[in-house]
Amino acid sequence: MFLRRNAIPVVKGTKDIFTPEIELIDHINRTADEKYRQYGYKKIETPIMEYTDLFARSIGTYTDIVQKEMFTFSDRKDRSITLRPEGTAGVVRAYLENNFSFNPGITKVHYNGPMFRAERPQKGRLREFHQFGCEAIGSMNVLLDVEIIELHINLLHKLKLKDFTLLINSVGDKNCRKEYTALLDKFLRKNKSKLCENCRSRADTNPLRVFDCKNPTCQEIYNDAPLLTDHLCDECAGHFEKLQSWLKLKTIPFSINKKLVRGFDYYTKTVFEIQSTLLGAQNALLGGGRYDYLIELLGGKPTPAVGTAVGIERLMIALKEQNIPFKPDHKAQVYICTAGNFDEKIVIRLMDHVREHGYIPFYSYEAKSLKAQLKEADKLNCSFSLILGEEEMKKDQIVLRSLEKGSQENIDLNDFKKNISDYLKVKN
RNA sequence: GUGGAUGUAGCUCAGCCCGGUUAGAGCACCUGGUUGUGGCCCAGGUGGCCGGGGGUUCAAAUCCCCUCAUCCACCCCA
């Protein structure tokens, strides 16, 4: 079944996206665009490739993504280029490059496009995958954190998704992290001998990430570890408090997960994730948080910001898993059949005419029996077929057959053209 | 990078354990049953380097080795 002789397969972890699925994707994207518009976000498109340093600096040199999951190559002048593994870095680069800070108000943008990570593919994880997301750059106000969370929860409701939960946490800022890191360091050094190899190396390079470890013995040890959430400075604790009370006020259910540490180094204060039980092992549908130092880190003035990214493929899995019927509404399809010898000019003109009135014409293009043409019309789900018969054409008539009712009538061609919408009414 | 499962017709899969006629089914596709009328039904037909390579054997889809691919899980993340 696999490869025909000489054929070249798709690249590992990438997929062709076409007919039934792409309609669902379009629907998701349209719904998201509309939601972002309602919340005042403007669309932005940034390049799929950026200089490697952009990601190394923003995501963090010692993160798994930068260490081993980027598609990186050299251009002809030996500059290191990387296919973007996430959307925020590019947006922030564009923010600086185009001086968005001089625009009125804060910057609210949303994006949508492919991302690339060189991981081993599995359910809900591809090497080329698609995300949409948004960034609100220029304010520390916790209201933005709340707004962004609310926006996406609204969106999931709009898409009729069930069975998802919001997890929140705070990862502090420079101040509290410094003090906390000292505490955690001490703890990790004390327990170093009992930790797995991975955790030991993380203890040195990126201690906060140890909590991601799924090794049960490590996790048991971490039950007694000091948690950043319990050691926030006054400002961060206040921010986190406010976030919670706003969420309560808005009756958005959430749970605090003190071990929620996300895979990018740039997060500060608020981090959150929405998980779905319908997904399998990769249960994060969407994730995001604050990144108050990133703009500065990439060469701008100190500017606080918050953002989110949603995994489209994962959203689709969840949506499909709960069998939400999605039927794109489409105009009536009309199949034009011919019987006997014909000048195809008549067919072409008729197709044009049908199209001009908003219906979708189909035609066999290949010589086929009338029976075969009607069969095809049926398979294509056409509502009507117009039969151009040699006999009828002598009288300037055509046959209009309703494929749903199974009835047909001879009508005057000009009359049909004039009153096309009356003839092609589809009953719902 | 590590582990497990699976690769047979366009699709879903049987056959493999226990080697032995021309490798099967359902769906899909094409033709006919209607000189110009779909769906349902009936009859017939097209379509397979049995993922690839090597080995064992008189004989391999079937047993052994290697390899590639896909899926799932770990890691990490959307």
Image (cartoon, coloured by chain):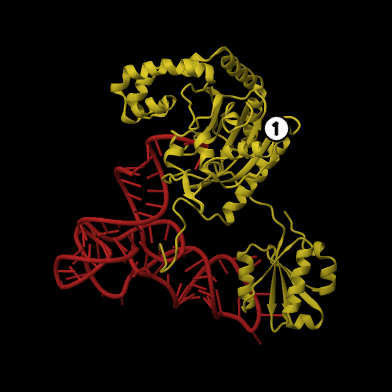
Disc 1 designates what residue?
Answer: A101
Q: Position of residue B23 (x, y in %)?
A: 33, 70
Going by the numbered disc 1, the residue's amino acid type is Ser
Q: Position of residue A327 (x, y in %)?
A: 64, 50
Query: Is A271 or A420 nearer to us in this picture?
Result: A271
Query: Is A385 or B69 nearer to us in this picture?
Result: B69
Q: Colour of chain B?
A: red
Indicate the chain coloured yellow by its letter.
A
Query: Is A6 or A299 nearer to us in this picture?
Result: A299
Q: Quadrant of the N terminus of chain A?
A: bottom left
Regarding residue A158, the answer to whether it shows in the image is no
Query: Is A128 or A276 nearer to us in this picture?
Result: A128
Give the number of callouts.
1
Neighbours of disc 1 within 10 Å: few (<14), some (14-19), many (20+): some
Q: Is residue A102 left or right of residue A178?
A: right
**Name of the residue lying farthest toward the front:** A77
Q: Residue at x 44, y 24 (%)?
A: A208
